[in-house]
Image (spheres, rainbow, N blue to C red):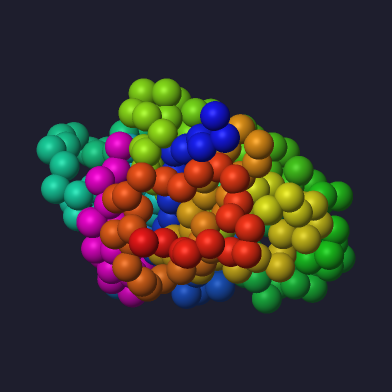
Amino acid sequence: SRLVAMATVILVRHGRTTANTAGVLAGRAVGVRLDKTGREQAALMGGRLAVVPLVGVVSSPLERCRQTARFILDSQNLDHQGELPVTALEKGFTECDYGEWQGRTLAELAKEDLWSVVQSHPSAVTFPGGESMAAMQARSVAAIRRHDAAFELQHGSGAVWVAVSHGDIIKSILADALGMHLDLFQRISVGPASVSIIRYGAGRPSVIATNTDSGDLSWLRASPPAQDAPVGGGAGNL
C-alpha cells in the first residue's frame, strides 16, 4: 500500500545556558546548566509538548539536555523516579567533541583560520584534538534513525517521541533529512529550546517543522499523514 504512515520525532535543543550567555563554546564540559531564561524556555517548550502523548524521550547525556528533558517529562505528568527521568540517554546525541576549542570564547575562536572553514566547508573540518563534523553528523543521524525505527516497531506508526540534543547536532540531522550537503548546514538555525519535527519514511524523510518556539502542537495527536507528498501542498495539519 502507498498509504504508509510513520513515526514522528520531535527534535528539541536544550534551553539557553550559562555558557551561551557568556559566549563560550561549552562542548562537552561538565557543569554547564540552564540559566534562568533557559529554564523558562524549557518550561514553555514542555508546555507546548504537554498536549502530545509521547512514547519516549531520549536525551544527550550532558546536563543541560537532561535538565531540558525533565521539563518535558514533568509536563507529560509521567511517573518517573530517579535522578535521570528520561526514557534513555544516547551518546550519539551528545555535543560535538570540539577538542581544543572547548571552553574558549567564540570571539577568540572567530580569529582562528579554522573558523572560516567551519562556516563555509564544515565537511572538511576536524577540530584540533577533537571530532570531525562529518563524523558528528554520521553518528547523530545513525542514532536518530535507530531510535525512530525502534519506537515505531514498538509503538506503531503513530508514535511520537522526542530527542533532546544540541544545536550543531540537530542542524546536522535536519540537513541530512533535507538532503542537504553538510557544507550547507550553517544555513539552518536551531535556537535554544526550539522544536523541529521530522518523519522518516521508507522512501524519504519529511521535514515538518524547523526551529519553532511557539505554536500549537495538538495536531500531532492525530494519525500521521500518508507517506506520499500531497501534490499542490495538501490541506495542512488538521
Position of 25 relative to 176 (above/below)? below
**Is residue 61 in view?**
no
**Residue 49 placement, left or right of 204:** left
Position of 158 relative to 13 (above/below)? above
Q: Residue at x 50, y 74 (%)?
A: 22
Q: Residue at x 32, y 37 (%)?
A: 56
Q: Residue at x 58, y 64 (%)?
A: 233
**Residue 21 placement, left or right of 56:** right
121 or 154, which lies in front?
Answer: 154
Q: Main secondary structure of the magenta part?
A: helix
Residue 9: give x, y in percent of width and height: 45, 45
Q: Residue at x 46, y 47 (%)?
A: 225
**Is residue 204 in view?**
yes
Residue 62: give x, y in percent of width and height: 43, 45
Residue range (magenta): 37-55
Residue 180: give x, y in percent of width and height: 75, 54
**Residue 99 placement, left or right of 149:** right
Is 99 inside the magenta-drawn segment?
Answer: no
